[in-house]
Image: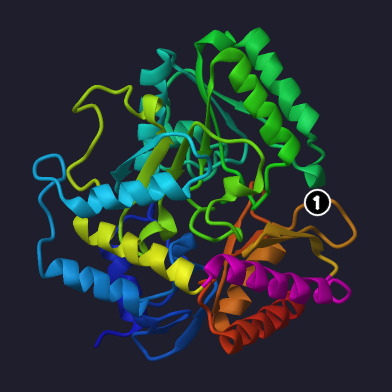
């Protein structure tokens, strides 16, 4: 069997550098919240495949559902020969998403694909073309996804020009001196200087920014956006690709707010590691595109659909929304306990199990990306996988499986504490 060093050389020779890879080792196997590399070393996974594994690696119920489906058929293309499991999952999503209004759901393969299609749907429904997104937001690596994304490095460098009539407003963040009113004022300036609100099809935002730094949208912002949309006939899109399926202590993050979106995107933990995404929205809006306008060869793959049915069952049976809140509390308690000995800690925040810690240079308001990177690297050397994020690359985000064993969670938090102290 190859070792990590030889495989790294082969990877560098055979694959492009644009596909950035964090870990200097290769996985052999995984179980729940742990994985082992090809040399037999164990790692605790606080990354979850970037928020894909809320139900853990290889959950038995998910694995069994996919195996059972594989015995029947693996592909027909839903648009050629449909299957009941797609329809049943759409019915579930329509029922589980916020709001009692009539909804419809279409399935795709990736979060970026869901975002692309929600913009298509919004434009078809409104007859308008403009879209407003937010700084720090992440909506994918496709051309429209990049255009909507509010972070240049590394996602947009060298890839322009991007689709037209995409505008950005600052996302509110008290830590960085941006208030809700600042954001709303910026949208008003867009309406005065850049685009007539009657040409805006949609406003899109993540209820909790993912790549942007795990900043939760203030309730005041969400209410104001809903009013702006209602006043001008604009659709409100909630991008729940990273926040969905129990991560924030609710099945969907929009359940934390007292307003409803017109459209929602979802993916990542929806199918426990299998490629599935969805757009769910008001029935009349979802029906705007003509037949054939939506779809995709692999959209709604039957193996992934089977996995998603199992994921929903696991979330309900194992009470993962409640467990997300408990996990988040454990992480926050650990981080708060480190404040006295780690002066770089500038902020600890999050909803449910979607927690982040932001680092500044000690005694200043200057983001400390170098310290953040050291924490990540030292933790990895000690067997803990962490992800960083944030516009300034100074945030560590926690996306461990919500099924993580208590003893493994505690072990990982101890490694985290040691890494933060050693990184100083």
Q: Is residue 234 above or below residue 1?
A: above
Residue 312: x percent and y percent? Answer: 40, 62
Quadrant assignment for the C terminus = bottom right
Q: Is residue 321 left or right of residue 276?
A: right
Q: Is residue 36 magenta?
A: no
- From the image, tell me which residue sits under label 1: 366
Q: Residue at x 35, y 33 (%)?
A: 117
Observer-nearest residue: 107 or 333? 107
Q: x and y percent of residue 368 in the render? A: 74, 58
Residue at 50 percent across and 32 percent down: it is: 148
Q: Is residue 136 above or below residue 184?
A: below
At 29% from the left and 23% from the top, the residue drawn is 289
Residue 37 is left or right of residue 239, and the answer is left
Question: Looking at the image, which is closer to me, 64 or 99?
Answer: 99
Residue 287 at x, y percent in the picture: 32, 26
Q: Secondary structure at mark 1?
A: loop
Q: Is residue 44 visible?
A: yes
Q: Position of residue 183 (x, y in %)?
A: 72, 29
Residue depicted at 32% across the width and 47% down the height: 90
- What are the residue bounds of the magenta stretch? 319-342
In the rendered structure, the answer to whether residue 274 lies left or right of residue 255 reads: left
């Amino acid at each position: 069997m190859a070792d990590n060093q030889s495989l790294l050389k082969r990877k560098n020779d055979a694959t492009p550098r644009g596909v950035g890879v964090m870990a200097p080792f290769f996985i052999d196997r995984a179980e729940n919240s742990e994985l082992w590399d090809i040399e037999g070393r164990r790692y605790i996974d606080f990354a979850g495949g970037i928020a894909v594994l809320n139900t853990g690696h290889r959950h038995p119920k998910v694995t069994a559902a996919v195996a059972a489906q594989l015995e029947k058929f693996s592909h027909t293309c839903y648009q050629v020969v449909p299957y009941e499991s797609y329809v049943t999952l759409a019915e579930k999503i329509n029922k589980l998403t916020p709001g009692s209004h009539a909804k419809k759901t279409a399935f795709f393969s990736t979060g970026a694909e869901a975002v692309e299609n929600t913009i298509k749907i919004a434009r078809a429904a409104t007859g308008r073309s403009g879209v407003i997104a937010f700084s720090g937001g992440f909506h994918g690596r496709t051309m429209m996804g990049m255009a909507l994304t509010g972070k240049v490095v590394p996602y947009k460098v060298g890839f322009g020009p991007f689709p037209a009539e995409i505008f950005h407003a600052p996302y509110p963040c008290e830590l960085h001196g941006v208030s809700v009113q600042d954001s709303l004022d910026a949208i008003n300036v867009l309406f005065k200087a850049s685009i007539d609100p009657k040409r805006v099809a949609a406003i899109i935002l993540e209820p909790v920014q993912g790549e942007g730094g795990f900043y939760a949208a203030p309730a005041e912002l969400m209410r104001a956006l809903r009013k702006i949309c209602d006043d001008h006939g604009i659709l409100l899109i909630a991008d729940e690709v990273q926040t969905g399926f129990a991560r924030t202590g609710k099945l969907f993050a929009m359940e934390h707010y007292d307003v409803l979106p017109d459209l929602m995107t979802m993916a990542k933990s929806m199918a426990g590691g299998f490629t599935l995404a969805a757009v769910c929205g008001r029935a009349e809006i979802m029906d705007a595109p003509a037949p054939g306008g939506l779809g995709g060869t692999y959209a709604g793959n039957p193996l992934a659909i089977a996995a998603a049915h199992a994921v929903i069952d696991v979330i309900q049976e194992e009470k993962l929304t409640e467990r997300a809140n408990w996990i988040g509390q454990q992480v926050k308690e650990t981080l708060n306990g480190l404040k006295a000995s780690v002066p770089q800690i500038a902020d600890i925040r999050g909803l449910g199990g979607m927690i982040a810690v932001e680092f500044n240079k000690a005694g200043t308001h200057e983001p400390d990306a170098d310290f953040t990177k050291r924490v990540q690297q030292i933790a990895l050397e000690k067997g803990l996988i962490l992800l960083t994020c944030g516009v300034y690359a100074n945030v560590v985000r926690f996306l461990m499986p919500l099924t993580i064993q208590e003893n493994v969670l505690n072990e990982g938090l101890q490694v985290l504490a040691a890494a933060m102290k050693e990184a100083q």
